[in-house]
Image: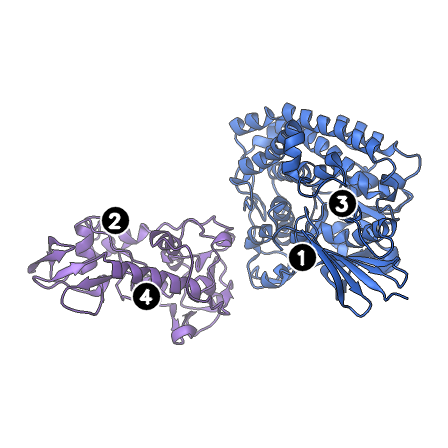
Amino acid sequence: MPILTFAMNGHQVSGHDDETLLQIARQHGIHIPTLCHLDGLSDIGACRLCLVEIEGQDKLVAACVTKPQEGMSVHTDTERLQRYRRTIVELLASEGNHQCAVCVVNEHCQLQDLAYAVELQYVRFPYLYPKRTLDATHKDFVMDRNRCVLCSRCIRVCHEVEGAHTWDTAGRSFHCTIMADMDQPWGTAASCTSCGKCVWVCPTGALFEKGQTVAEMEKHRDFLKYIVTARRTGEWIAEEEEGE
Amino acid sequence: MEPQRTITIEPVTRIEGHAKITIHLDADGQVNDARFHVTEFRGFEKFCEGRLLWEMPGITSRICGICPASHLIASAKAGDAILAIGIPETAEKLRRLLTLAQWTQSHALSFFHLSSPDLLLGFDADPATRNVFGLMAEHKDVIRRGIRLRKFGQEIIETLGGRRIHTPWAVPGGVRESLGAGDRDRLLAWIPEAMETTTIALGILEGVHAKFAHEIPNFGSTPSLSVGLVSEDGGLEYYSGSLRMRDSNGNTIADQLDPTDYSEYLGERSTEWSYLKFPYYKPLGHDGGTYRVGPLARLSVCDYIETPLAEAERQKLRALSADWDVMGNPFYYHYARLIEILFAIEKIEMLLSDSDILGEDIRSKAMINRQQGVGVCEAPRGPLFHHYHVDEDGVIQQVNMLIATAQNNQAMNATVRQLASHYVHGGSITEGALNRIEAGIRCYDPCLSCSTHAIGKMPLQVQLIDSAGRVLGERSR
């Protein structure tokens, strides 16, 4: 597997040609914010928070789905990128119904962490207050679409790891939502094994355990690394990515 | 002949929320009617629809920054009813502790921060200094103590719930965190100081009663029912028990009413001029069914208080007059509030000294077993009802909240009418009259944030309106 050498924030770094810029950055201790990425799941570049600049091209690229090229020069934290990332978080905040104060994952939420990271103190865009549904028909879990950021981690973990493919998307643009089976109440979805993986990988309070109260739910996602490694090696260990 | 006119006091100050008062004058400039308008709207009952039962204590405690703990308890109790489970004994004792801490902090706020400027500096004092800061200059020690007393209540709430305001600690089925021995001891050590402050305040109030002896009889003493929770044997109650109603002569007209059936005997009337609804006792109709709630009403309906110092003060209050009129005079709300602080401190000490309070069995868990439930507790200002309907998955379908302040609405209007009739003459309003009308409202310590399910503070505005609805004059501060 060829090893390529290129520059990241002015420092020489190297990585395999099948690794992503995000992986290589992390191996070298360079932080790039993410939301839809989760170790153990495929990457789809949905959230655009990991956008990076490549010298010589105007178009920004998502580090989680971009492979390196020999001699390229990548920047991960420019003023322009900071502006874009902040704008993305603002748009996410204005597009959903995110009421942190009364959310089950308040203080344990990856969207909230991002808002702190980009120093979000106000949102410049009008809040859309979309009318979205809450599905509490599952016996153990709840899907609150008001808090969904469409990262699709739930879809990917259900398809790629559990193999059930209960979740998918329905609709487009503002009307895009996560649906269970044939867009039916979750509790009636025959494919769902009630494993709960979708709940644990969800970065926000969109998926949570029934009975949880405000700020009570903390999501532990380490299980995924064990499963993914066990699938590949047959050993129940978690292979940490370098730099994690 | 002069046209009919209306005097408007807007906004009313030193109460929690936004309101105005209008005084309607007849053609001779005499008071024809007076109304207390609540001018804010919040809509909690509507936007809670579609949320989950388990979130409700966290959401509804946001109704108010003064008494969030009371909403939390009423909501958690409504949740208990829907889960159809009994909560562990320790959880109930801890919830009781939180409720009493809420009484202490709210009553201390009402007495020391909001009402004592009127009581200590006088209704005719300069409004610029007739506030807690003006009081600081003249009665520094008293105010400092009052602030500390409020802090005592807040400290208990913070110790139990992790934060002073809007803790989500009480949940359907019990509470989330237990109380540690170290924290228990720290809170117990605070009791003597809290007790001493309350005793000092009672002494001050005795002087106030003497100073305003000639004014007190005209302080909105109109006949009404009193309603409050009592224990099985008629003692003062704040967390469970049944409702009792007494009339203005002290006769018990209804007893052992199950508070969860409130909608059977309490009605709510709406008007086009206020966002605050007008609850009444259904069997006696809109006007005859006017009732008061809160400290004075609770002391009117109970036969005794279980703690000795508070009971001795209750008897002193009752002995102020041979007949029952003291219990119908809103001025004595202040006294009742201090008696309740005394009770709360004595009872907090009892609860903290109970070894059960440190128990670890604090939460029962269950899924939805009933599709509706009512939770009731005595908030500082009176009985608080949370009534939820859910579907089989626990999604809220309908919410009704009956708030203490709303239940005083008709009585507050009667008080405003009486004070206006007594102090407003000849079509003009003096500063002293303005202040007394406001102080009449303040007796009830209304919390409009809660009662309209709004936030903010109240400045004061007065409008003079003629019979054609034109504003003739306006004063505000």
Choose mark 2 or mark 4, whichever is in front.
4
Q: Chain ID for label 3?
A: B
Q: Quadrant of residue A154?
A: bottom left
Between the C-alphas of marks 4 and 1, the distance is 48 Å
Query: Which one is in front, A126 or A237?
Result: A126
Residue at the disc numbered 3: B439
Q: Chain of mark 1?
A: B
Name the secondary structure under disc 4: helix
**Mark 1 element type:** loop
Mark 3, Cα crowd under 10 Å, few <14 / some 14-19 / many 20+, is many
Q: Is residue A140 left or right of residue B475?
A: left
Cα distance in 3D space between marks 3 and 1? 21 Å
Circles 3, 2 touching at the beta carbon (< 8 Å): no
Q: Secondary structure at mark 2?
A: loop
As drawn, the label of residue A66 is: none
Drawn colour of chain A? Answer: purple
Instruction: Report which residue position mark 2 lands on.
Output: A236
Amino acid identity at mark 3: Ala
On residue A159, which mark appears?
A: 4
The N terminus of chain A: image quadrant: bottom left
What kind of residue is marked 2? Answer: Trp
**Left or right, residue B332 beside residue A174:** right
Q: CA distance from mark 4 to mark 3?
A: 66 Å
Q: How many marks?
A: 4
Q: Chain of mark 2?
A: A
Same chain check for tags 3 and 1: yes
